[in-house]
């Protein structure tokens, strides 16, 4: 069950509930467990998200990271504002071939116009698989 802060923008909550986090998020099997500007957590199955030799695809790591970073930034932006990704990078430290991975998104900078998050993706044993860093520009509608 996703923990959503009580003071979250109702329009953002409605979009998240209606879309399940978006079409790509659904296709990847991403499930949000906790959502806030400061810290968000989600899981994703390895199965169905592998590349040709059976490893979790590097792009899947980035999709999980961007999903968390974008939503956390949108929460920080608040009502009447939105977040647009302007930079993302990933360092892959370890591979995985099965199980579920967990992404934990932590705010590094929460400013008025920019939000930067670090997303650490770990395997079932808690080993770091990758580190994703994302910066979003916050804009008025």
Image (cartoon, grey):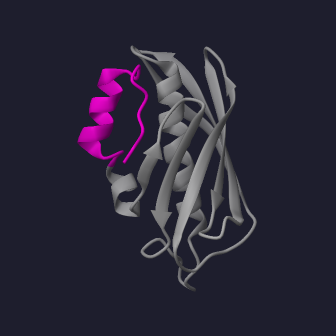
The picture quadrant where one finds residue 95 is bottom right
The number of callouts visible is 0
Work out whether 19 lies above or below 76. Answer: below
Q: Residue at x 33, y 38 (%)?
A: 16
Q: Is residue 14 magenta?
A: yes
Point out residue 14 in the picture as x, y percentages from the top left corner: 27, 31
Q: Residue at x 32, y 30 (%)?
A: 13
Work out whether 54 lies above or below 112. Answer: below
- Please name whichever residue, 36 or 114, is drawn nearer the observer in this view of the structure: 36
> In which quadrant is the C terminus drawn?
top left
Point out residue 38 in the picture as x, y percentages from the top left corner: 60, 31
Q: Is residue 41 magenta?
A: no
Answer yes or no: is residue 35 visible.
yes
Q: Residue at x 56, y 73 (%)?
A: 56
State the residue lying farthest toward the left. 18
The picture quadrant where one finds residue 10 is top left
Point out residue 125 in the picture as x, y percentages from the top left corner: 65, 70
The picture quadrant where one finds residue 136 is top right
Work out whether 102 lies above or below 35. Answer: below
Answer yes or no: is residue 83 visible.
no
Q: 101 left or right of 126?
A: left
Q: Residue at x 57, y 50 (%)?
A: 65
Point out residue 21 in the picture as x, y percentages from the top left corner: 36, 45
State the residue lying farthest toward the bottom. 53
Q: 79 left or right of 89?
A: left
From which residue to which does the magenta span run? 1-22
């Amino acid at each position: 069950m996703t923990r959503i802060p009580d003071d979250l923008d109702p329009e953002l909550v409605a979009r998240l509930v209606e879309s399940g986090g978006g079409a790509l998020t659904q296709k990847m099997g991403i499930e949000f467990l906790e959502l806030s500007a400061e810290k968000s957590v989600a899981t994703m199955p390895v199965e169905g998200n592998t590349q040709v030799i059976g490893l979790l695809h590097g792009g899947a790591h980035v999709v999980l990271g961007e999903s968390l970073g974008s939503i956390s930034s949108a929460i920080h932006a608040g009502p009447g504002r939105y977040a647009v990704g302007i930079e993302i990078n990933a360092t892959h430290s370890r591979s995985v071939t099965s199980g579920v991975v967990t992404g934990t998104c932590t705010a590094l900078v929460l400013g008025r116009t920019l939000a930067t998050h670090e997303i650490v993706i770990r395997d079932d044993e808690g080993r770091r698989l990758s580190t994703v860093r994302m910066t979003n520009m916050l804009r008025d509608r």
